[in-house]
Amino acid sequence: QVQVAESGGDLVQPGASLTLSCIVSGDGMRGTGWNWYRQSPGKRREWLAALANVGSPTYSDTIRDRFAISIDLARNTGYLHLTDLKPEDTALYLCNVRAEKGITVYNQWGQGTQVTVSS
């Protein structure tokens, strides 16, 4: 069974930076692709960025100049680096991971980590 856990959310002031983490765990599990999303109350879930173990990152146009995705395969962890945060970035940030164990492929969501931007 694959588990996914996000962390790093916080209450910050406008203009601040944060790094969110998304760790994959489970016996023999190997993360091969990470997608980050966010969701605010009353709004649809919004896709932000994606990065696989091969290839280049892709970004939503709404955040490409301020957010960056990276992964550390040795740590089975993906990251989302947030800069110049604005109040409208306040949301629950969620990670969706593609993981493999042998020939079996899994897709798993985490519970999310809350980012609140307020002065």
Image (cartoon, grey):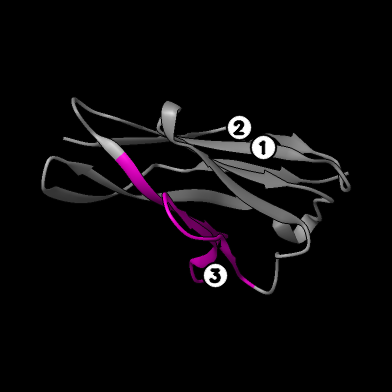
Q: Amino acid at mark 2?
A: Gly
What whole-number distance in Å separates the C-alpha atoms at marks 1 and 3?
Answer: 23 Å
Residue position marked by numbered label 3 in the rendering: 43
For the magenta stretch, what is the residue range? Answer: 31-60
Q: Are discs 1 and 3 less than 8 Å apart at CB?
A: no
Q: Which residue lies under the disc numbered 2? A: 8
- Give me the residue at 70% from left, 65% from top: 63
Q: Pick the residue in front: 62 or 68.
A: 68
**As rendered, which of 24 and 47 lies closer to the eye?**
24
Q: Residues within 10 Å of mark 1 (few under 14, many from 20)?
A: some
Q: Earlier in the sequence, mark 2 or mark 3?
A: 2
Q: Nearer the viewer, mark 1 or mark 2?
A: 1
User: Is the magenta region chiefly helix, strand or loop?
Assistant: strand
Q: Earlier in the sequence, mark 1 or mark 3?
A: 1
Q: Are marks 1 and 2 in contact (CB under 8 Å)?
A: yes
Residue, disc 1 = 19
Q: Considering only vertical position in the picture, is 64 above or below 52?
A: below
- Residue 104 placement (x, y as % from top left): 11, 48
Amino acid type, label 3: Lys
**Image side of residue 100 versus residue 62, left or right:** left
Task: Give the Cα separation between the discs numbered 1 and 2.
Answer: 6 Å
Is 51 positioned to the left or the right of 62 in the image? left
Going from N to C along the chain, the mark reached first, 1 or 2, is 2
The residue located at (72%, 47%) in the rendering is 82
